[in-house]
Image (tube, grey):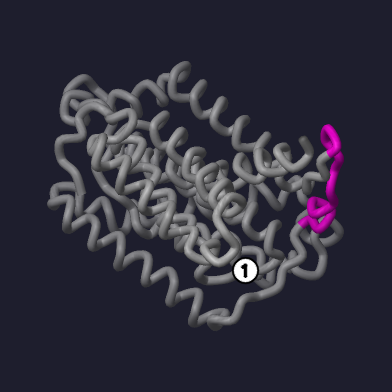
Amino acid sequence: MSAILQILFDALSLGSLYALGALGIALIFGVMRLVNFAHGDVIAFSIFALLWPSVDVVARVGAGNLPWFLLIPFVLAVGAGLSVLAELTVFRRFRNASPATMMIASFALGFVIRYFLLMLYSSRPKSISLLPALSQPVEILGARIPLLQVITILATVAILFGLTSFLRRTRFGLEMRAAAENFTMARMLGVRANRVIMGAFALSGALAAAIGLILGSQTGTADIQMGANVMLMAFIATVIGGLGSLPGAVIAGFLLGAASVVMQVTLPIDARPFRDAFVYGAVIAILIVRPQGLLSGRGTKERV
C-alpha cells in the first residue's frame, strides 16, 4: 500500500510540473497561436533571480533581505515581468507575421535569455538554499512522502482552481477566453488586444516562475538548462491535449507525469535508462489514433 501511494505521489508531483508548463504554453497559444519555445528559459531566468546580489537569498533565505513569504511573490513577479517584456519588445512586432516566423522569434529569444545567463553565471550549476525544510518527509498512510511533493500537488491544484475561477468569473478572464476562441471577432466586440495578450504573457511567466521555484527546491541548484526538459514535455502535453485547449493541456500533463513514473517502476532495470523513449513512443501512438489531441480546442486550424 505504501509503495502504491509513493508511486501515486511521484506521478502527481511530476505531472504537476508538466501540467503547469503546458498551461503556460497553452495560454499564449490560445490568444496568439504562438508556441513560445522561450518558456523553458523563462523558468531558468526566474530561479537565477535568486542569485541577484541585492536579493542574496543563497546565504539568508528567511532571515535576511527576503523571507519566504516575500520570496515567492518576488520570483513570480520576475517571471511575469520577463514574459511581459518579451511581448512588448519582441512578439508585439510579429503579431501579423506567420506562425513560423513567430516560432523562430521565440527560439531566438530563448537563446538570448540563455546566453545572457551564461554570460553572468557561466554554465556550471549554482547551489541555492531554497527552503530546505521542504525536503523533510511526512508520513501519509504509512508512506513517507517529501513535504515538497505534497506542497507541489496542493499548490498546483490551487493554481488550477484559481485560474479556472479567474477565466470564468472575471471580465478579464472572459475577454481572454473570447480572444482564444476568435481573436478577430473579440476585437470587433471591444476586447482590448494589448491588455489580453499582456495578461496572457504575465500569467504564463508566473507559471514558469512557479515551476522554477519547485525545481530549485527539489534540486537545490540553479541550472541554465533546468527548464529545457520541462519545456519539451509541456509542449508535448499541449499537443496531446489539443492545441488551444487549457483543460486538455492540464490533463495531458498529468498523464505524461504518470506515464513517466509508472514506466520507471515497471520497466526492467536494463530498460529504465530508455524510459523517455517509451514515453515518446506512447505519445506517437496517441497522436496516430487522435492527431487533433485529446480535447482539441476550437479555432486551431492554424497550427505551428
Say which residue label 1 marks.
222
Q: Nearer the viewer, residue 40 or 188?
A: 40
Residue beneath the point at 74% across and 64% down:
57
- Could you tell me which secondary element the residue under label 1 belongs to? strand
**Residue 18 colored magenta?**
no
Visible residue check, residue 207 = no
Percent position of residue 44, x then y:
53, 63
- Res 111 → quadrant: bottom left
- Quarter of the image where the N terminus is located: top right
Is residue 23 rendered to the left or right of residue 50? left
Give the residues in magenta. 131-142
Percent position of residue 269, x then y:
60, 63
Kind of residue sitting beneath label 1: Ala
**Residue 133 colored magenta?**
yes
Mark 1 residue crowding within 10 angstroms, few (<14) / some (14–19) / many (20+): many
Percent position of residue 277, x then y:
41, 59
Residue beneath the point at 25% across and 36% down:
289
Residue beneath the point at 52% across and 63% down:
271
Visible residue check, residue 139 = yes
- Res 110 → quadrant: bottom left
Q: Nearer the viewer, residue 70 or 17?
A: 17
Location of residue 211 with respect to 20 vertically, above or below: below
